[in-house]
Image (tube, rainbow, N blue to C red):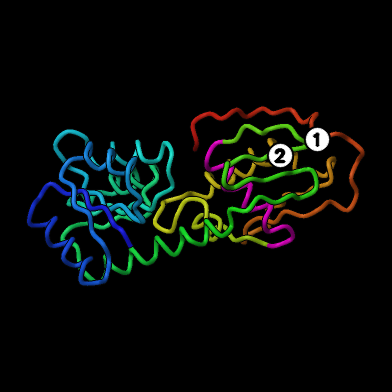
Amino acid sequence: MRIAILEDDPSQLELLGHWLALAGHDPQRFEHGGELLKAIDLEGFDVLILDWNLPGLSGIDVLRQVRQGSKLPVIFCTSRDGQDDVVTALREGADDYLSKPVRRMELLARIESVTRRARRMHAKAKAFQLDCFHVDPAERTITRDGALLELTDKDFDLAVLLLRNLGRLLSRSYISEVVWGADAVVTSRTIDTHVSRIRLKLGLVPEYGWELKAVYAHGYRLDRAQRAALLSPTKVTNRWSAEEEV
């Protein structure tokens, strides 16, 4: 794979590049965030490895700009190991986070993991229809009877997960891992709040033919309601706009 490394320590940059080359990858080395962003626009990369503390644009600044238009897998390799730093990077869209000193085999395993997950997500990117809902994962849009729904990123990911798994019980831990990532710290209240928003935004209530139910001590399941009143889901009051995510 073609892997970009952003690191301002020359010895660390050389070491990471050497490890990747030995593993059969094609490492591209960068010491400044601006240089990497220009290269991303011109070249194709499979993975980005970012340090955090850099002159000029920091690694987190680079991540934010990348996430404005790309789902390219990003791994942080940094000396910043505080919980707040890890949470910030993951919430900004990092796929994984490693604290220095980095171990070679762990780094290679993490690269394999994030690229495998990215391939699975790409394979699932085909648009699909479920009754009145049309879901386009590539464009990250959901329409209901042709009307575009306004969803935050996490609401969209959760809605797609539920619609893809109609009739299946999804545990809270599984929902957390798929929507927020394996290393994210997500409370039950956060999941409950997002589920409530999805229920309202999509009209997943018995009156419109759906039941999005909490299963005590397990998780959530989306089912078709046995009895559906003949109401239009477009009449659902959308009390939630795309405000800041919980």
Drawn side of residue 168 relative to residue 234, left or right? left
Q: Is residue 183 magenta?
A: no
Drawn side of residue 72 relative to residue 190, left or right? left
At 67% across and 56% down in the image, what residue appears? 164
Magenta segment range? 152-168
Image location (x, y in percent) of residue 199: 69, 41
Label ID, residue 41: none
Disc 1 element: helix
Q: Is residue 163 magenta?
A: yes
Q: Is residue 163 above or below residue 107?
A: above
Report, in whole angstroms, how far the alpha carbon at label 2 lies from the one at label 1.
8 Å
Image location (x, y in percent) of residue 235: 80, 29
Q: What amino acid type should be assigned to the residue bearing mark 2?
A: Leu
Q: Residue furthest front?
A: 42
Which is nearer the eye, 124 or 241?
A: 124
Q: Which residue is mark 1?
A: 233
Which is nearer the eye, 37 or 208?
A: 37
Which is nearer the eye, 8 or 95?
A: 8
- Asked if the residue under mark 1 is in contact with the one under mark 2, i.e. CB atoms within 8 Å, the reply is yes
Label ID, residue 202: 2
Image location (x, y in percent) of residue 52: 22, 44
Image location (x, y in percent) of residue 10: 8, 52
Q: What amino acid type should be assigned to the residue bearing mark 1?
A: Pro
